[in-house]
């Protein structure tokens, strides 16, 4: 018996040592996530509104007095100031940008336009009369601007404005192929000609529900007119919207021309 007693003793010792190692770490307890206390929807909505004053944004321009402010030819050196003014009053607008202006120093401005919740529109690459170009030149004018803006902002523009408002069936066909509606205007402030803020304010004040107002953010006098312009239209009960918001569910069709709602 002594011949096999020693191996049995060693086996028992190894077995006990193994058991000690196995039980050295107690089994992990299940992790129970801590559930936050429930928050009422109305309370959550108020919190979100406090973080973003114009959230949620649901504007029915079929019943509300809506007006779309549009700014052409930028971005320029006054665009930043304009964005500050619009942001202070939680106003959204539509910016029809020129590709050369974006490339020449307006990259950050166009990114901020998108980040601030404004709408971006294509105003060609070099501000030529599109109706006087060949089809190849016309295609290049819209494509280059569209690609640059999309690379900088991730935005695929759905609206365009032909420079000088000059359009024809070829421009309409190219806009349709590019998936963009042609947005003109029914109220011209002539701010490019008359560089007097008071005159710009007075002309913009002629807006009626559904109006699309034409201005240019490259002019200091236009930007200077904006605070008084906003006050004048707000007193009349207008809601400021982007072009796409103006049409709501009736989204402007690519290629078609629009001058107001």
Image: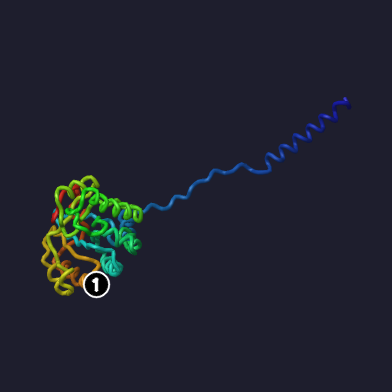
Looking at the rendered image, the quarter that the N terminus falls into is top right
Confirm whether residue 68 shows in the render. Answer: yes
The image quarter containing residue 18 is: top right
Say which of 188 and 61 sits in front: 188
Colour scheme in use: rainbow
Q: Is residue 155 left or right of residue 58?
A: right
Outermost residue to the top: 1
Q: Could you say whether the residue bearing mark 1 is in a helix, strand or loop?
A: helix
In the picture, the quarter occupied by the C terminus is: bottom left
Q: Where in the figure is residue 109, as x and y percent of width and height?
A: 32, 63
Residue 243 placement: quadrant:
bottom left
Quadrant assignment, res 239: bottom left
- The one nearer the camera, 233 or 195, is 195
Q: How many numbered circles are shown?
A: 1
In the depicted view, which residue is nearer to us: 81 or 87? 81
Give the x, y percent position of residue 94. 23, 59
Q: Residue at x 18, y 46 (%)?
A: 173
* Residue at x 38%, y 52% (from the top left corner): 38
On screen, residue 82 versus residue 257, left or right, reads right
Q: Residue furthest front?
A: 134
* Coordinates of residue 130 in the picture (x, y in percent): 19, 54
Please name the residue that numbered disc 1 is placed on.
220
Whole-percent x, y for residue 148 in the image: 33, 54
Q: Is residue 14 above or below residue 138?
A: above
Q: Residue at x 23, y 59 (%)?
A: 127
Determine if residue 250 is in view: no
Q: Check the image and report above or below for 90 versus 6.
A: below
> Residue lying furthest right in this view?
2
Neighbourhood count class around disc 1 (C-alpha, 10 Å): few under 14, some 14–19, many 20 upward: some
């Amino acid at each position: 018996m002594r011949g096999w007693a020693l191996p049995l003793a060693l086996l028992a010792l190894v077995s006990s040592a193994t058991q000690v190692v196995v039980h050295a770490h107690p089994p992990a307890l299940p992790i129970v996530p801590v559930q936050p206390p429930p928050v009422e929807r109305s309370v959550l909505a108020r919190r979100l509104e406090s973080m973003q004053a114009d959230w949620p944004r649901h504007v029915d321009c079929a019943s509300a007095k809506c007006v779309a402010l549009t700014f052409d030819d930028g971005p320029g050196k006054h665009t930043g100031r304009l964005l500050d003014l619009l942001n202070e009053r939680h106003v959204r607008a539509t910016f029809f940008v020129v590709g050369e202006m974006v490339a020449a120093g307006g990259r950050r401005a166009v990114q901020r336009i998108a980040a601030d919740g404004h709408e971006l529109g294509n105003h060609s690459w070099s501000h030529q009369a599109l109706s006087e170009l060949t089809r190849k030149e016309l295609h290049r004018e819209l494509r280059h601007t569209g690609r640059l803006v999309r690379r900088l902002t991730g935005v695929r523009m759905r609206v365009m404005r032909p420079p000088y408002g000059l359009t024809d069936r070829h421009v309409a066909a190219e806009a349709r192929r590019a998936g963009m509606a042609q947005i003109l205007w029914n109220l011209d402030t002539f701010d490019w000609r008359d560089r007097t803020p008071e005159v710009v304010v007075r002309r913009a004040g002629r807006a009626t529900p559904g109006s699309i107002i034409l201005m240019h953010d490259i002019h200091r006098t236009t930007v200077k007119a904006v605070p008084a312009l906003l006050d004048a239209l707000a007193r009349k009960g207008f809601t400021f919207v982007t072009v796409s918001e103006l049409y709501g569910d009736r989204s402007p069709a690519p290629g078609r021309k629009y001058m107001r709602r």
